[in-house]
């Protein structure tokens, strides 16, 4: 006799290989074990209890068995003929039994959320050829039977997703604890033209790692500072985050956020005087670049024409292919794999101007060739006229001069621009780059004129572009001639009115946006940088940093004790053999935790954490809006705000969500 309760019997592969067929025949001859009980045991949570149903025997008469001892369903053919190394997804019906049918449904919801996919279909009727991702997934996995019918409604999906959201937020909130944090805020319109405000919290966790989790999205009726402040307060208070723990603010630099009195930063400072406002450094640099095009008339005209050229050449796939063919004809065979495109410069896209300028220089002849083809073969007079105007502008000395000048300037700033986008970028390294950027731009202005002019002349001569007589008197195209000095030459015009103006504008923008208050802070906080510590350990600067910027975070007694800790820190840490391997404050923070030196120097670690979490860039919130464009597409523009928030947090913080078990979500649901 064989044991008919599959929950108690040995697995088929545990029998001797010569006995297995005999065992299989015995099970087949005895038939399926399908006990129909008046009532089956309950399982799951008290709120949502589940139990086995005898009608499932009618739905699956050829394979389903039930084990009273394990209160679980088994598949008899799977048990009889499965190999010992079955895939994990099949083990439930063979070894452990299956008693979590809702888990199948919930796994589909989690999968869709992690991938940022749409849940619903436009038409979910039985006749529809595409019922949407969720229902189609259920069908693909063979779970679209009557048992699941009540669990395919939008409300059920949203409730389950919201349970996940709350668990993710709870995890983030527990990680923050009572730590001081920095507030990063940005606002943007979604696909349905709603103003959405993204909130990111930046803090150092218990392991010394810098974290920037996405914490919420708030739909705001307008973008006034008061409205944005109320939205921030509602999110923080809902999760019991004390606004007094804010130690910095990072925003996008829009006028409603920068205003000294009316801006959001001023309103937050009223509630928390130590929430220092730090303008998004990456956005600052971009604004500085854009300011050149607006303040210097000739450069503004250049960027206007550059955008027009990029639009004309990239207006269709045909023209794009023509550009690639023309470029391929101009370059060596070994460089054919580096054929590029001509992107349109965008005011708020990091480094987009530099890419456009660099590519146009490399593709100058190919671009001219495409424009000439449009002039000859354009289908409409409008197209031919635009191409003709663009070609005439491109082949002027002034356009080529500014093209090369801006390449030199932006080649300097692009390194800083790229570094500021890094999520792990720390403030000290960023300001070192700011300083070197300003120095190199000044050096270009002092010593770069002759080299630039010679480079432009060679470029024009090889492409048959007329070079003006540089020593000739300059005659302005606009304005009255009597306003000009008789000795003002063409070379003076390009050197003074364009080259020097562009350099000066760049330096003025950088100096005004990286203000004196921030520089003072960074000079003092640089005393904590491992490189600076190895050169000279400045105890006085660290104490001054605490006294001037973080007086509320240290008591009078702690300020006195801090100096004593710093003296021991100099010999016990700075001169430690492993300290020379540390390059940033991020590295230092993690090393102090891993070596448990935070127990010995808690006050020093506290100031390190406060400095480390200063937000260098609001790139994280920008990445949130990039994710929002993935999740809320044109085809999903009817998403409700709460569902959008749940979907976004699951998509962006999926590393946290993946650690949450499906079973715990089922029980809570």
Image: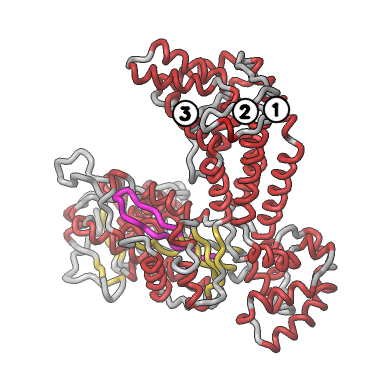
Give residue 435's position: percent from left, percent from top: 71, 53
Q: Residue at x 65, y 45 (%)?
A: 504
Q: Residue at x 59, y 20 (%)?
A: 336
78 or 551: which is nearer to us?
A: 551
Q: Is residue 589 magenta?
A: no
Give residue 363's position: percent from left, percent from top: 56, 23
Q: Residue at x 18, y 44 (%)?
A: 123
Q: Is residue 166 above or below residue 285?
A: below
Q: Is residue 501 above or below residue 144?
A: above
Q: Residue at x 41, y 63 (%)?
A: 216
Give residue 75's position: percent from left, percent from top: 31, 53
Q: Is residue 634 above or below residue 51?
A: above
Q: What whole-number distance in Å separates the C-alpha atoms at marks 2 and 1? A: 8 Å
| Badge nearest the viewer, 2 or 3 | 2
Chain part drawn in magenta: 186-202
Residue on which disc 2 sits: 401
Residues under numbered marks 2 and 1 in contact, where contact means CB atoms less than 8 Å apart? yes
Q: Quadrant of residue 207?
A: bottom right
Secondary structure state at the residue bearing disc 1: helix
């Amino acid at each position: 006799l064989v044991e008919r309760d599959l929950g108690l019997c040995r697995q088929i592969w545990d029998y001797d290989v010569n006995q297995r067929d005999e065992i299989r025949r015995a099970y087949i001859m005895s038939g399926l074990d399908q006990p129909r009980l008046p009532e089956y045991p309950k399982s799951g949570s008290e709120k949502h209890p589940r139990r086995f149903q005898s009608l499932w025997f009618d739905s699956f008469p050829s394979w389903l068995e039930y084990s009273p001892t394990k209160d679980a369903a088994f598949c008899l053919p799977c048990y009889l003929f499965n190999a010992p190394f079955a895939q994990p997804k099949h083990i439930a019906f063979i070894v452990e039994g299956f008693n979590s049918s809702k888990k199948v449904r919930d796994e589909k919801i989690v999968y869709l959320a992690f991938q940022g996919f749409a849940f619903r279909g436009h038409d979910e009727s039985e006749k529809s050829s595409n019922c949407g991702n969720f229902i189609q997934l259920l069908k693909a996995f063979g779970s679209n039977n009557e048992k699941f019918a009540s669990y395919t409604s939008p409300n059920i999906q949203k409730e389950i997703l919201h349970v996940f959201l709350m668990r993710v937020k709870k995890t983030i909130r527990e990680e923050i604890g009572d730590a001081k944090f920095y507030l990063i805020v940005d606002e943007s319109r979604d696909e349905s033209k709603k103003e959405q405000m993204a909130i990111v919290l930046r803090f150092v966790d218990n392991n010394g790692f810098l974290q920037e989790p996405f914490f919420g999205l708030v739909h705001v009726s307008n973008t006034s500072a008061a409205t944005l402040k109320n939205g921030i307060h509602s999110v923080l208070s809902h999760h019991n985050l004390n606004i007094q723990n804010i130690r910095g603010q990072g925003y996008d630099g829009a006028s409603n956020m920068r205003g000294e009195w009316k801006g959001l930063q001023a309103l937050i400072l009223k509630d928390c005087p130590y929430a220092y406002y730090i303008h998004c450094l990456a956005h600052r640099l971009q604004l500085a670049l854009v300011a050149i095009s607006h303040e210097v008339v000739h450069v503004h005209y250049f960027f206007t024409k550059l955008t027009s050229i990029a639009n004309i050449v990239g207006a269709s796939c045909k023209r794009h292919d023509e550009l690639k063919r023309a470029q391929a004809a101009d370059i060596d065979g070994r460089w054919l794999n580096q054929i590029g495109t001509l992107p349109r410069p965008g005011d708020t896209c990091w480094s987009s101007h530099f890419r456009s300028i660099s590519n146009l220089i490399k593709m100058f002849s190919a671009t001219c060739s495409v424009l000439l083809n449009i002039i000859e073969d354009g289908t409409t007079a409008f197209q031919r006229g635009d191409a003709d105007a663009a070609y005439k502008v491109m082949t002027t000395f002034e356009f080529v001069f500014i093209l090369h000048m801006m390449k030199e300037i932006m080649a300097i700033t692009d390194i800083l621009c790229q570094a500021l986008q890094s999520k792990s970028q720390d403030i000290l390294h960023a300001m070192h780059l700011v300083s070197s950027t300003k120095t190199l731009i000044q050096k270009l202005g002092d010593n770069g004129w002759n080299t630039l002019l010679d480079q432009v002349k060679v470029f024009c001569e090889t492409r048959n572009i007329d070079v003006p007589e540089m020593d000739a008197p300059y005659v302005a195209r606009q304005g009255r001639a009597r306003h000009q000095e008789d000795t003002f030459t063409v070379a003076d015009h390009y050197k003074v009115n364009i080259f020097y103006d562009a350099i000066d504008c760049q330096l003025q923008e950088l100096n005004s946006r990286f203000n004196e208050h921030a520089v003072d802070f960074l000079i003092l906080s640089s005393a904590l940088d491992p490189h600076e510590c190895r050169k000279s350990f400045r105890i006085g600067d660290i104490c001054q940093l605490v006294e001037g910027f973080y007086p509320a975070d240290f008591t009078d007694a702690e300020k006195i004790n801090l100096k004593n800790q710093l003296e021991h820190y100099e010999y016990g840490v700075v001169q430690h053999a492993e300290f020379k391997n540390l390059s940033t404050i991020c590295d230092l923070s993690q090393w102090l935790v891993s070596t448990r030196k935070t127990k010995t120097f808690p006050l020093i670690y506290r100031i390190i954490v406060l400095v480390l979490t200063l937000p260098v860039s609001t790139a994280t919130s920008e990445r949130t809006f990039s994710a929002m464009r993935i999740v809320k597409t044109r085809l999903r523009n009817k998403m409700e705000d709460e569902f959008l928030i749940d979907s976004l947090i699951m998509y962006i913080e999926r590393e946290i969500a993946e650690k949450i078990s499906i079973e715990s979500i089922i029980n809570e649901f």
